[in-house]
Amino acid sequence: MTTTSADSSLVSRRQWAQLAAVGLASAASWNACASGSHLPSTTSLPQSLQQALQRQQPLMVMVSLEGCAFCKVVRENYLLPLQRQGQPVVQLNMRDKTEVLGLDGVVQSQDAWVRQQQIKIAPTVLFFGQQGKEVAKRLNGAYLPDFYNAYLEEQLAIARQAVLR
């Protein structure tokens, strides 16, 4: 099959359009992250925990579910402000096949880790301290929005005290 110069310029235009579309999608994704609407993920909970403990802070892990409106509220209104103040927070996702190294040294998908932790409700917020132990009560769900911040602050204070012991 032979191509004419018109055909090759058409291919070039198509390739250019595809590259532009990929670039726009990447820029949109970057802007969403840069605007601060996402928590960082992690591929290593032990490493994230070590970094948190070096700062004398517990590691907060938010378990989220794609499209969960309650998760968005907890992330944007409570956890992102804490993260901006220096609190180490990472997010793992139900149904996500991305691998993560767990605190037990096992590499598995985020979804498998969530199931191993027996988490069935999104959002769930966990607090980890020394030796990868949970050091405060989990926050399961985002019910009672008027009181969520008080519950969060109470458990975070307990977790911070446990880390300082």
Image (tube, grey):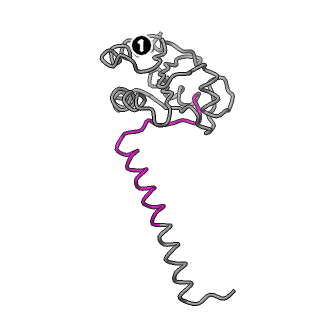
Measuring from the top left, give residue 12's x and y in whole percent: 52, 78
| Range covered by the magenta-colored residues | 20-45
Q: Nearer the viewer, residue 4 or 86?
A: 4
Q: Secondary structure at mark 1?
A: helix
Query: Badge 1 local density, few (<14 within 10 Å), some, or many (20+)?
Result: many
What is the chief secondary structure element of the magenta stretch? Answer: helix
Q: Is residue 110 above or below residue 144?
A: below
Q: Residue at x 51, y 13 (%)?
A: 135
Q: Is residue 47 above or below residue 117?
A: below
Measuring from the top left, give residue 150's x and y in whole percent: 33, 14
Q: Nearer the viewer, residue 10 or 101?
A: 10
Q: Residue at x 44, y 35 (%)?
A: 39
Residue 11 forms part of the magenta stretch: no
**122 sits to left or right of 110:** left
Instruction: Kindly identify which residue carries mark 1.
Output: 155
Q: Residue at x 51, y 36 (%)?
A: 41
Measuring from the top left, give residue 97's x and y in whole percent: 62, 38
Q: Nearer the viewer, residue 164 or 108?
A: 108
Looking at the rendering, which quadrant does residue 109 occupy? Answer: top right
Residue 44 forms part of the magenta stretch: yes
Looking at the rendering, which quadrant does residue 153 occupy? Answer: top left
Q: Indicate the quadrant containing the N terminus: top left, top right, bottom left or bottom right.
A: bottom right
